[in-house]
Amino acid sequence: MSDIDEQFYFKPTPTLLLSPADETPTQPCDAWPDDWDVAVAVDRIQRATTLEVGARATKLAGLRSS
């Protein structure tokens, strides 16, 4: 699920998968989530929904090709 402006998305799985839906240009690398990006995703989702995001069990990052 995402918001109309595509500022975040989330997927309710056994745990909650969420993303700030950012598109930060970068060269190929070993991607790692930035703490700021994690905080932005949590903030956007909590402001737009009634979800309360608790402790983060795992943080992941990925690269997309254009």
Image (cartoon, rainbow, N blue to C red):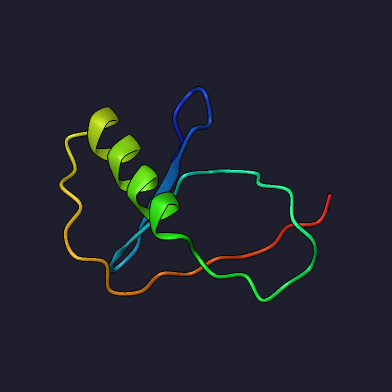
Q: Considering depth in this image, is 3 or 25 the residue closer to the camera? A: 25
Residue lying at 34% horizontally and 63% vertically, measured from the top left: 13
Residue 57 lies, in percent from the top left, at 28, 74
Q: Is residue 60 visible?
A: yes
Residue 27 in the figure: left or right of residue 60: right
Identify the residue at horizontal 23%, vertical 38% (top origin).
46
Q: Which quadrant would residue 21 be assigned to in this image?
A: top right
Task: Give whichever of 37, 21 is nearer the camera.
Answer: 37
In this orientation, which residue lies closer to the viewer: 50 or 20?
20
- Relative to 4, residue 35 above or below: below
Residue 54 lies, in percent from the top left, at 16, 59
Q: Position of residue 58 (x, y in %)?
A: 35, 74
Q: Is residue 60 shown above or below 64?
A: below
Count of marks, rendered view? 0
Position of 7 with respect to 66 (left or right) is left
Of residues 20 and 17, the one nearer the viewer is 20
Image height of 27 relative to 29, above or below: above
Q: Residue 18, can we see it?
A: no
What is the x, y in percent for residue 66? 84, 49
Q: Is residue 43 left or right of residue 7?
A: left
Q: Residue at x 30, y 47 (%)?
A: 42
